[in-house]
Structures are given as C-alpha cells and as structure tokens.
Image (cartoon, rainbow, N blue to C red):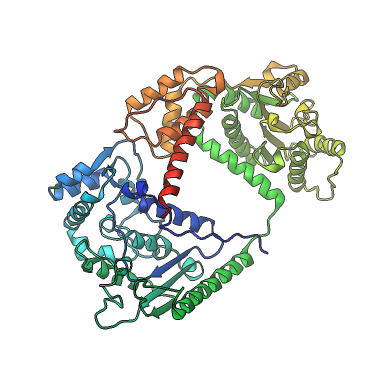
C-alpha cells in the first residue's frame, strides 16, 4: 500500500560459532542495530526486558594505551597471551563509541575518544576459547575496576548515558544494545521509534524471580554460573538495567514446566503472545504513519541529479592519484581559460581511474560554476537506470536544465530525433555569460545501443558557445567480440574534434604506494612495510591483461589488505582484477557459509 517493506532483525540469530569464538558478537550486533536505525522509516528498536542479563564477552579490541594500563594495574600474563598488538589500526574500530553529542552528561569527550585511535590490541583467544574465557573476563574486569577506581566507585558504569571504557569490561552485549538503541537516542526517537516491553514470571515459593531453578529450562531464562547457581552479580546488573528505561508495556505470566513459555500448549501463554504482537503492531503502524506524514514527495529530477552528485562526491574524497595531475591540470585549463568551441575528452583503458578523475573534475567544476552563478550538471553514465539509455539521459538532463533556466513552458518530446534536437538547442542556446553551463558526462561508452547512443550524434561536440563547457570520458575503441557489441566512441570524438589538445589520456599509475596508503587511511587502516612490499611486488608483476595494476585493481587490493593485522603474513595477491574478484568472492562466500551453517540447529 505505501511501498514500504517490513524487516525484522533478531540480534542473536545466525551469529555462527566462528564469530562467537572470535568474540565478534558485539560488533555484529551493533552494526546491525546501526543499520536498522539508519534505514528504518519508523520503529527501529524493540528491547524486551526479561530475567537474563546476557553474554558479557571481553572486548574484541582495546586501544593500546588502555590495554597497557590495564595489564600494568594487575599482573595479567593470561591477558597478554590472549591479545596481540595490531599497529595497522589507525582509528578505533570498536562499535561502543556512541554518537555525539550524547543526550545527557557523558563521561568521555570527543577528544578522549580520539585519543583511543591508533594501534589496538586484538583478542586472539583461539579456536576453542571457552576454557580460558571465564578467567580472562574476570581478570580484565578486576583490572578495569582497579584502574578506574574512582569511576567505578562513583557508579559510572551504571550511568545510562555514560560511554566510559570501564563499561566495556562489565556490561553485557544486551545492555550495550540498549545503550545504542535507546539510552543514547535523541528524545524524539525515544518517543516514536523505540519501544521497551517487559515480561516476567509470577513469583512463588521456591522460585527465583518466578523461575523454578530445578527446572531443566531455567538456565535458558536466568544467568547461571558453571556450578548451577544463579549469577547474582549479573542479576544485580539486570535490575539496574531495567531501571534505566521504563517499559511501555508489561506482562506477568506463570512459568510453564519444562518450557518456560509455551504458547503451543498453554492458552494463557498463547494469549500473551497474541497481545504482545498486537501491542507491537500498533506502534509500528503509528510510527510509519508519522513518517509518511513528514515524508517529502519524491522529485524525479532532483533525485536523479542528487544521485550523480553523491556518486561524484564519494569518489572525489577517495581520489589521490598523482599520476593524473597533468590530466586534471588540462581539465582545469579547459574550464578556466577557454573551450575553443569544443568538448574536452578524458580517456583511458578500463579501470585506469577515469571516473575518479571525472569526479575530481566535477567537484572543481561545481565550485567554479557556483562562483560564476552558473549551472552545473553531472551524469556518471550507467550508474542509474536514467543514465543508461540515451533517450532517458537526455530527458533527465533537459528536465534539470528546464528548472535551472526557467524554461517550464518547454515540452520535452517523446520522439527521439526531436529530443536530440531540443537537447542540442538547450545546451548551446539556453546558457549565457551571466549564467554559464558546465556539463560533465562520465563513461559515454556505457550507454546501450538504443537509439544509437554510442554513435554520440546527440552530443554537441563542436561549435560550443564560450559560456558552455562539456567534459566527457570514454574507453578506447572496442571491437565486437564473443557476441558483445563493440563501440568506437573515442574514434568518433576524434573524428568530430580533429584536435589533439581536446583529449587527455589517463596514464598508468606511477605511485601505487601513496594510493594504497590513502585508500587504507579512509578505512582507518595501514599496513606494515613487509605487507606493502607484497602489494608492490604484485603491482610490478602486472600485465596489460585484465586491468592489472589499475586504480580498480588497487581498490580491490585495499579491500583485501584492510583485513590484515600487523602480525599477519600477507598472502599472495593475484595480479589481475579477475583473480582479485574471485579471491574476494571466495572469502565472502566462506564467511557467509560458515555463518549460515552455524545458525542452523
């Protein structure tokens, strides 16, 4: 009805044994919660308060300065055995960092969080960690309490809005979710996008919070130690946690022997589950209706323009190719000094980095256009459905130009030849010295063959007025091979322009090390000198086959290298893009398969 899709994400489902053993539970859950908060138009978090406080794992990563203070505070040889220093980390990867500003007083400032950036100690407890788990957790917890004596005494770890590192050694993953999902949320989200339900059992003689401890299912409902006794510390933390956020709805039910909750055989439990669902459905619909009431109606023209600008901005921020400085310089000269009545063409082989160069050029052209009170239009062809066919491309650009040049009375024809004629007219006659036009078209070769788009007859390549700049990019000519249609975009532009000065070729990379370092830094990572040597060796062994050694190849290598710790031995790197993609797919498939299989009982 509304075009929305309902998706439910249960935090513990399908967290596999490998991830659990590697203490990835917290990071996986917080990432999924963040995704829900970012993508949901309505309700995004439901916390169900019951009788179990939950899993309290040791931190997967600890900033170097925090770790070294901890082990200095307490002789902790067992802790040192379980953690290894990773100097490849340059920012804190931990999901515990809250969004700032927090709603209320915070025990840690932005500067203090920034101080946690840099090398991290990473938990490496082994393939079967549980024999050492309890000792490790207790040692770290004791060390943290001693290191932050005053904070612990003051109850910082029980302050709902506190983000102090002390909490990481004490609270459960469930409370961490509650912090991210509700306690650190802004008040408006707390009213419309978050719900807290509470379920408890009827108290009775011989029961603990309504749970008979001699029942075989008791351990699934309450925190217990290895000796079968209740974990009183966890239960105290649970009681404090429940007090941090009042429930929106509460149920008290009787314990079902051997089951705990049994809606299949207990009518009262079945009624409870039905009411629970009804009470959840109502706020879901209410929050969705509220979101719809405030939803801006989509604007097809603006949305298309924004998609391409975002695409350009993302790639502009990643750009750091010193080899392309000459190409960028020539593009700037074209934009600033004069167009000679012609389009400026940037070309290069597949994966050479043309799109990054066009993104950088687009960013500079947009700033120039704004300063001149001009109009700027960018399209990265093939990245949206409206930029893959020439008719849709011309239509979307014309719609944007109509708005920019106040040509609302102009009708856009459905006949392609008329559309092509109007496009040429709009580009060459609507702009003026007072309101110039800059048009950036990346990858004209990405058009399909509908309406002979790659013949480029629709593009006004010559006789451009001085108030118009058009920068386009393309691949070299490709002949028809194995059933795939070829194209000659570059040859056609050369034939139309007859001017070498109107062309700039993106050359092979000359400084791979700086590009790898830059791309890694965007992910908060670096690699060791030995690992960089492996990357550079693979780069220098490249061949022309399959885009080896191109920016695309380097980008894929960085995705792989970003997973390396400083104590890892770098694997052999495929010298081709094809080999790298296969490598990354195999890695992803293995992780997904392990997770899926381990999630099945």
Q: Is residue 270 left or right of residue 327?
A: left
Is 224 rendered above or below residue 413? below
The reply, left or right, for residue 76 in relation to residue 360 is left
173 horizontally vs 558: left or right:
left
Residue 59: x and y in percent read: 29, 51
Would residue 494 be found to the left or right of residue 312 on screen? right
| Residue found at x 33% / y 26% | 529
Q: Position of residue 33 (x, y in %)?
A: 45, 57
Question: The N terminus lies in which quarter of the figure?
Answer: bottom right
The total of numbered circles placed on residues is: 0
* Horizontal and vertical percent position of residue 541: 45, 17
Please name the residue shown 50% across and 31% down the image.
Answer: 582
Q: Residue at x 55, y 23 (%)?
A: 547
Q: Quadrant of residue 447?
A: top right
Q: Is residue 304 visible?
A: yes
Give the x, y percent position of residue 62: 28, 47
**Along the line of sight, which residue is nearer the eye, 176 or 379?**
176
Q: Which residue shows up at 15% across the image and 47% down it?
A: 76
Which one is nearer the viewer's eye here, 590 or 367? 590
Res. 471 visible in picture:
no
């Amino acid at each position: 009805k509304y075009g929305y899709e309902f998706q439910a994400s249960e935090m513990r489902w399908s967290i596999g044994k490998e991830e659990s053993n590697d203490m990835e539970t917290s990071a996986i859950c917080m990432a999924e919660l963040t995704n829900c908060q970012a993508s949901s138009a309505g309700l995004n978090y439901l916390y169900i308060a019951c009788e179990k406080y939950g899993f309290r794992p040791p931190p997967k990563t600890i900033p170097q300065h925090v770790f070294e203070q901890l082990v200095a505070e307490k002789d902790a040889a067992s802790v040192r055995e379980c953690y290894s220093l990773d100097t490849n980390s340059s920012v804190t990867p931990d999901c515990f960092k809250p969004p700032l500003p927090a709603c209320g007083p915070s025990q840690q400032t932005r500067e203090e969080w920034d101080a946690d950036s840099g090398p991290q100690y990473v938990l490496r407890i082994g393939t079967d960690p549980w024999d050492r788990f309890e000792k490790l957790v207790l040692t770290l917890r004791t060390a943290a309490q001693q290191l932050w004596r005053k904070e612990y005494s003051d109850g910082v770890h029980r302050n709902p809005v506190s983000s102090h590192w002390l909490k990481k050694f004490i609270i459960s993953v469930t409370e961490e979710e509650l912090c991210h999902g509700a306690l650190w949320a802004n008040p408006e989200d707390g009213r419309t996008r978050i719900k807290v339900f509470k379920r408890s059992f009827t108290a009775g003689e011989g029961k603990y919070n309504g749970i008979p401890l001699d029942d075989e299912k008791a351990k699934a409902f309450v925190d217990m130690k290895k000796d079968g006794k209740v974990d009183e510390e966890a239960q105290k933390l649970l009681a404090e946690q429940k007090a941090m956020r009042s429930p929106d709805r509460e149920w008290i039910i009787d314990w079902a022997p051997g089951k705990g909750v049994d809606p299949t055989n207990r009518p009262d439990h079945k009624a409870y589950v039905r009411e629970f669902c009804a009470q959840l459905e109502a706020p879901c619909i209410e929050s969705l209706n509220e979101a719809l009431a405030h939803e801006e109606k989509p604007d097809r023209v603006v949305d298309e323009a924004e998609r391409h600008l975002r695409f350009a901005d993302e790639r502009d921020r990643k750009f750091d190719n010193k080899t392309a400085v000459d190409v960028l310089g020539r593009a700037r000269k074209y934009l600033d000094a004069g167009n000679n009545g012609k389009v400026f063409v940037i070309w290069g082989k597949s994966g050479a980095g043309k799109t990054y160069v066009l993104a950088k050029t687009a960013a500079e052209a947009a700033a120039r256009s704004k300063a001149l009170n001009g109009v700027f239009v960018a399209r990265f062809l093939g990245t949206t459905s409206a930029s893959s066919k020439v008719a849709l491309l011309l239509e979307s650009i014309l719609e944007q130009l109509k708005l920019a040049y106040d040509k609302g009375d102009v009708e856009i024809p459905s006949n392609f030849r008329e559309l092509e004629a109007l496009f040429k007219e709009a580009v060459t006659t609507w702009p003026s010295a007072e309101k110039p036009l800059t048009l950036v078209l990346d990858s004209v070769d990405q058009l399909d063959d509908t309406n002979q788009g790659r013949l480029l007859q629709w593009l006004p390549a010559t006789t451009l007025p001085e108030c118009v700049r058009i920068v386009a990019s393309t691949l070299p000519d490709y002949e028809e091979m194995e059933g795939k249609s070829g194209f000659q975009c570059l040859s056609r532009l050369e034939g139309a322009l007859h001017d070498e000065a109107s062309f700039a070729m993106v050359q092979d990379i000359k400084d791979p090390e700086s590009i790898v370092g830059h791309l890694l830094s965007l992910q908060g990572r670096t690699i060791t000198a030995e690992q960089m040597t492996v990357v550079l060796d693979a780069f220098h062994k490249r061949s022309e086959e399959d885009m080896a050694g191109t920016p695309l190849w380097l980008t894929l290598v960085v995705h792989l290298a970003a997973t390396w710790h400083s104590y890892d031995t770098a694997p052999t790197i495929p010298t081709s893009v094809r080999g790298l993609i296969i490598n990354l797919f195999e890695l992803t498939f293995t992780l997904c398969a392990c997770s899926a299989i381990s999630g099945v009982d």
